[in-house]
Amino acid sequence: MLLEVKGLTKHFGGIAAVKEACFQIKESEIFALIGPNGAGKTTVFNLITGMLKPDSGSVVFGGKNLTGLKPHRIAAAGLTRTFQNLQLFGGMTVLENVMAGAHLKGRAGFLKSLTTWPGTAREEKKIRQEALVLMQEVGLTGLEDLPAAALPFGRQRLLEIARALASEPRLVLLDEPAAGLNSAETKELASYLKRLREQGKTLLLVEHDMETVMEVADRILVLNFGEVIALGEPAEIQANPEVIKAYLGEVEQVA
C-alpha cells in the first residue's frame, strides 16, 4: 500500500472532527473521500499533509511514518496537495508557477534557482521544458507569460494541479478540484484525472461533485460526523443505505 491511515483522530474544543479514521490507498488508483458538509474531509487532508497534528493515530506513506512531520518534509517525501481555496503565486507567470512546484524535486532548490549556483542554469532549462509539457497536458499552452491571477478561475484550478504534479509526487491530494468549474471544465478535469491514473499517478480526491466522483474514482470512502461509514467501489457506495441516509437532502447527487 502506498498510504496507510490508522486510527486518525482530531478534536477541536472537545468536538471530534475525525474519529479513528482508517483506510489504505494503492499505487495508481484514484481514491475519493466524500461526505456531507462538516464531515471532516478537509481535516483528514490537513492531518495527512502535516497542516494539523493528530491527537492519535498514524499516517504511513511508502513505508515511512509521516505522523507529526512538518508539511515541507511531507512534501519532500513525495506527497503534495492542492487547496479548496486557490493558493497560486498571482504575480508570477503561469510558467513560473509550474516551475516553482518543480523546484521541490530539483537539486538546486527554489532559493538556489534565484542565484548563480553551479548547475542552476542546466537544471532550470530542464525544469522549464518539463513545466511546458505539463502545461500542454492540462491545456495551458500559449498562456506561459500571463500572470497567474489573470487566468479564468477554471484555468487557475488546472494550473494548481500542474504545479502540484511538477514535483513528481507519488501521491497528489486534490481538495475539491471541480469547485467553481462550469460543466465543460468539469468534464475536462475528469478526463485529465483519468489520464493521470493511466500514467500511473495516485490521487486522493475530496470532491462534492458526485457525478465526477462516480466517474473517476476506483474506490470511495465516506465520512459522516468525522467517522467512516462506508468504503467501497462507486456502485457499492451508491447503493449503501448508510450513505443515502447521511446525504438526506443531497440524495440526487449520490443516487
Image (cartoon, rainbow, N blue to C red):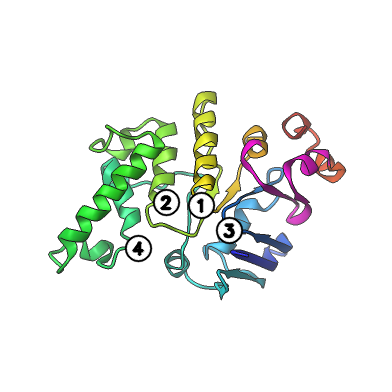
- Sequence-earlier tag: 2 or 4: 4
Circle 2 or circle 1, nearest the eye: 1
Q: What is the x, y in percent for residue 206?
A: 60, 47
Q: In the image, what residue type sits under mark 3?
A: Glu
Give the residue at mark 4. 105
Q: Is residue 219 left or right of residue 245?
A: left
- Sequence-earlier tag: 2 or 1: 2
What's drawn in magenta, residue-wise? 215-239
Query: Could you tell me which secondary element the residue under label 2 belongs to?
Result: helix
Q: What is the x, y in percent for residue 185?
A: 49, 28
Q: Is residue 162 left or right of residue 67?
A: left
Give the residue at mark 1. 201
Q: Is residue 64 left or right of residue 32?
A: left
Q: Nearer the viewer, residue 67 or 235?
A: 235
Query: Could you tell me which secondary element the residue under label 4 belongs to?
Result: loop
- Residue 165 bears which disc, if any? 2
Circle 2 or circle 3, nearest the eye: 3
Tell me, yes or no, whether the highlighted magenta stretch contains residue 233. yes
CA gap between label 2 and label 1 equals: 9 Å
Quarter of image, res 228: bottom right
Query: Could you tell me which secondary element the residue under label 1 belongs to?
Result: loop
Q: Nearer the viewer, residue 133 or 79?
A: 133
Tell me, yes or no, whether the highlighted magenta stretch contains residue 221. yes
- Residue, x 18% and y 63% (percent of image)? 120
- Residue 27 bears which disc, if any? 3
